[in-house]
Image (cartoon, grey):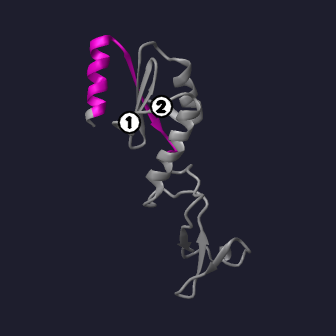
Amino acid sequence: MATFRLILALATQYGWDVDHMDVVTAFLNPKIDRDNIYMEIPLGIDWLASSGSESSGSASGGSVLILRKALYRLKQTPRLWYEDIDGSLQSIGFQQSAEDPNLNLQPVVLLVLYGRSAHCAQQYRRTRTSDQAVAAGEVQDV
């Protein structure tokens, strides 16, 4: 939060534009590719257990599913989303700050990630980079 306050102070002092963007599907998009996360089949969808999908037995005798994408309240979801968004930001030229991993830098753009929100301070109004960020992450301007 201190980084965000510092960015706001710098933006005020130098007359930068500040945008607040909300990542609508932040915790629903990350793929689970290196951990196996199992979920018991919820009540009411027993048909899923017999549909031939990728599942296995559990210690309690019921079937479980292997998750391929993160769910909203999964403990690993924020970490998976941050890894996903960092890869996307690096692909369009951002560098992660060594002091604060939530701060991503470009020559005229400072981007702070906080929860599922992104705060962008930039020297010029609506750079091509902020348009790319909006397109890449299903981001909405707030």
Residue marked by disc 2: 95
When the figure is inspected, residue 136 is found, relative to residue 121, above or below; the finding is below
Q: Residue at x 59, y 34 (%)?
A: 136
Q: Are marks 2 and 1 in contact (CB under 8 Å)?
A: no
Left or right: residue 51 versus residue 84 is right
When the figure is inspected, residue 36 is found, relative to residue 117, above or below; the finding is below
Extent of the magenta region: 3-26
Q: Amino acid at mark 2?
A: Gln
Residue 58's x, y, as percent? 56, 83
The answer, for residue 138, to whether it is visible in the render is no
Q: Secondary structure at mark 1?
A: loop
Q: Secondary structure at mark 2?
A: strand
Residues 49 and 122: in front is 122
Residue marked by disc 1: 98
Residues 24 and 88: in front is 88
When the figure is inspected, residue 78 is found, relative to residue 135, above or below; the finding is below
Residue 50's x, y, as percent? 70, 78
Residues 83 and 136: in front is 83
The alpha-carbon separation of the residues under discs 2 and 1 comes to 9 Å
Q: Residue at x 50, y 40 (%)?
A: 86
Name the quadrant containing residue 7.
top left
Quarter in which the N terminus is drawn: top left
Q: Residue at x 39, y 43 (%)?
A: 115
Residue 15's x, y, as percent? 33, 11
**Magenta includes 25?**
yes
Q: Amino acid at mark 1?
A: Ala
Residue 135's x, y, as percent? 59, 31
**Magenta includes 8?**
yes
Quarter in which the C terminus is drawn: top left
